[in-house]
Every structure is written in structure tokens, then in C-alpha cells.
Amino acid sequence: MKHIYDDEADIRTKAAIRVMSLFFVGLIIIAATTSPIATGTKAGERAPALEGKFYNGSGGWTTFNLESYWDSNWKEGDASGQWVALEFMDTDCPYCVRSAEDMSVNSADFDGSNPQWDGAVVNFIASVTELDISGHDSSRAEIEAFRDKTTGQSCASSDCGSRPGSAHAFPYIDDLDQDNMKKWKVGGTPSYYLIQPDGIIAWSSSENPGEDLRDAILGLVTRESAQTDGV
Amino acid sequence: MVFEMDSNIQLMLYLVPTLIGFFLVLPIGKILANPLSQRFPSIATERGRLFFGLILTGVAGFAVSIQTLWISSKVSEGGNFCASNTVFSCDDVIGNANYNVDPFFGLPWGGIGATAFCVFLYLAYSSSLEPNSEWVDNYLKLGTALTFGGFFVIALLISYEVEMEKICQYCTTAHIANVAAFVGFYRLMKLNDSGEWNQDS
């Protein structure tokens, strides 16, 4: 007599196959209908949140929301989208003090007010931390003095009012507790990130040693005219 | 089309079966099961009703977990699914990169939920197919223990929601399904121990 079933078969195998099939069907549906982007701080990843109070020259310290900068409908090549250049810095870090001049020049050149720049607007943001190094004692008053270039506070052993460059017109976020710095896995200051209008990181200084933020902006930010070489 | 449906109406596709399953595994589930037992003879007995309710909540819990995984993928793309300015905003909860993965391995909670409900389904479904096998007792105990463990995960996820001051209604449906699954497994385990396992009603 012909056997049409297996006497030794176990119902648990049948149940396992059916349940596993259900599981894989679910995964296949997700794989077929979505293209998830990981959150992280490398190029191509979605920028993590940046939290804290920020100072923008007036109105005191208010809650910062990085997500308000993002445009989920932005497409590559669209020059109307606004990019973000983010600097992680410490007001007592000598190199950060020296690079304040570059930040002054870059923000003035790319913030949309420069008629010679035919590219997308780049919004500059500074996240200010207090590194665990002797002599690095910062405060909100020091951050304000550094940003506004006013006297009365000490930045890297000199008066904040004497730092290089002009006063900055972009927001400074209080990250004295290092929360943002840890979340972004920033190894040292200053560190720079260039972020697309859709919130995807386009460039980071840690991944591109030897290349500065200005070069990254000129090379990556969408331009209205591809023929223009610089500012 | 399902994906164009309002997110709260779509939620009902998961919530209604979850609540029916939950009702069936409760002692008062007889009220619902008795009129339906002519059409569905398998739920005429206490054991059949508990298995049916358990499998229903398992399927609904799995489906809603897959949906949360889908939402987290969509939010990561920059899209939105159920964003809202009210306290009920699953995008804000599922899309929050600080909380939407487990703290040890970085796995998305939706994927963990889908895997867990598949395990619950396997334990319940295989036990329902051969209810008098000797391994059923262990399967029911394992199911009870695993779903009880789920309470700690639920507590952690609710603490995240409290911190964010937002509620993810899809996640809450999965949490209800876990509670229902625990009740189902626990009552089946007790029934199995009681000697009334093979009674006709």
C-alpha cells in the first residue's frame, strides 16, 4: 500500500513552517515597500536629533529643533532647499577660537545674503560643549560672548571679544552637558557636518580629513549654475 | 487601498481582532463564543475558545508589529504616516531614533515584537493542533513565561512614551495583544493542569 503521509511527521514542524512563512511574508512586504535609512553621523545616514536651548542673539535661550530645518520633499539638484552646516565646538578650545574666523566668512558667504553665491542657502549652527579638560570651564554667558564677540568672558585664555572673525549671526546651542556631542559620537572639537535639506548627512570632517567645510560646501551644495567655480 | 487609509482607521484592522481575541480568552468570552459555536465548532469548548482567542491575538499582534516596523522604515526615509500635533502621534514615538531600538542590540522594537508574536503563535498553534501531546504542557508554560516577560518590555516602552509625552497607538495595540496572549497562555496552562483539558464544554 502506498504511503501518502509520513508516520513520523511532527505537527510542530508543520506549525513552525507556517509561522515562519508568515514572518517572512511580513519582512518581504517591508523590504518591497520601504527603503529605510539608518540614523547616524556618517555620510548617507539620517542626522540624529540635536537637542538643547539655543541662543540667537536676542530673545534669550529657547528650545532648539533641528527637525524644523528638514524638508522631506527635497530632491537632489533642487537649489531651493536649505542645507545645514553644523559645528561642534568648545569656546575654550584654541583651534575652535582660531576657526571662528572661517565660520564668520563661510556663514556670510553661503547664508543667502551674498549675491555672488548662486547655490542653495546654508544655515550655520554651532553646538557648544565643555570638554573634560582642565581649564575648559564654559557657561552660557561665555557662549553668548563668543558668539556676539563681546568682552568680559575668557575664551581659551583670552577675552572672548578678541577672538578672530566677526560676530556670528547664527544660532549657538548649549551642549555643555555633552549630550549632543555623545549622541553624534564627536571625537574632538571642532568637528563639522554638512547636512542636506532632507536631513541626510552629506559630509563630515571626521570622514574627510584634510578637506575643510568650505571645500565641502563648494563641492556638494546644489548650485543654480554648475559653471560657477567659487565665490 | 490600505496604505491610503487614515492611519487611525487602519489601526482598527489590528485593534478589533486583538480586542475580540482578548475577550475570548477571558472567562466572560463564553458570551461571545456560545452564539458562534454553531458556526465555529472549535470554539464550543473552553480549550478551543482559548486557543482561538490566543491565535487571533497572536496574528493581530504580529501584524501590528510588522506595521510599526514598516512605519519606522517610512519615517527613516523622511516620510510620515501618523504624525500628529496631539498626544497620539506614533511617528514621533516610532521615529525617535533614541528610543525606537532596543538598548542592547539596536534592533527595532517592531522587529522584536514581530519575532515575539511569531514565537507565541508557534507555541499556541502547534499546541492547538495536537493538544494531547506530551510537549504541550511545556509549550504553554513557556508561552506564559515569555508573555509575562513582555510586561517588562511594555513597561520600558511606556516609560519612553511618558518621557516623550506622546502615545503610539500602534505600539499600544501590540502591548494589549501581549497582555491578551499572557491571559490566554496562563488560562490554558491552568486548564491543562486541572484535568478538564479534554472536556466537551
Image (spheres, rainbow, N blue to C red):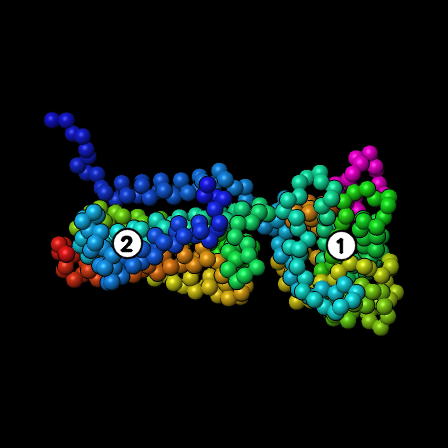
Q: Label 2 sits on what residue type?
A: Gly
Same-chain status of marks 1 and 2: no
Out of A42 and A72, give the one closest to the viewer. A72
Image side of residue B44 versus residue A192, left or right:
left
Q: Distance from label 1 to label 2 (Cα)?
A: 56 Å
- Number of callouts: 2
Quarter of the image for the C terminus of chain B: give it.
bottom left
What secondary structure is found at the residue carrying circle 2? helix
Question: Disc 2 marks which residue?
Answer: B53
Magenta residues? A211-231
Dot 1: what SS? Answer: strand
Quarter of the view holding residue A95: bottom right
* Chain letter of the residue carrying label 2: B
Q: Which quadrant would residue A13 be assigned to in this image?
A: top left
In the shown orientation, is residue B6 left or right of residue A17?
right
**Disc 1 residue type?**
Phe
**x%, y% of residue A78?**
71, 40
Please rate how many residues cluster around mark 1, counting C-alpha atoms within 10 Å: few if below 14, some from 14 to 19, many from 20.
Answer: many
Q: Nearer the viewer, residue A192 or B69?
A: B69
Q: Residue at x 50, y 40 (%)?
A: A33
Q: Which residue is label 1 attached to? A: A124
Place residue A164 in its image quadrant.
bottom right
Residue extending furthest front?
B35
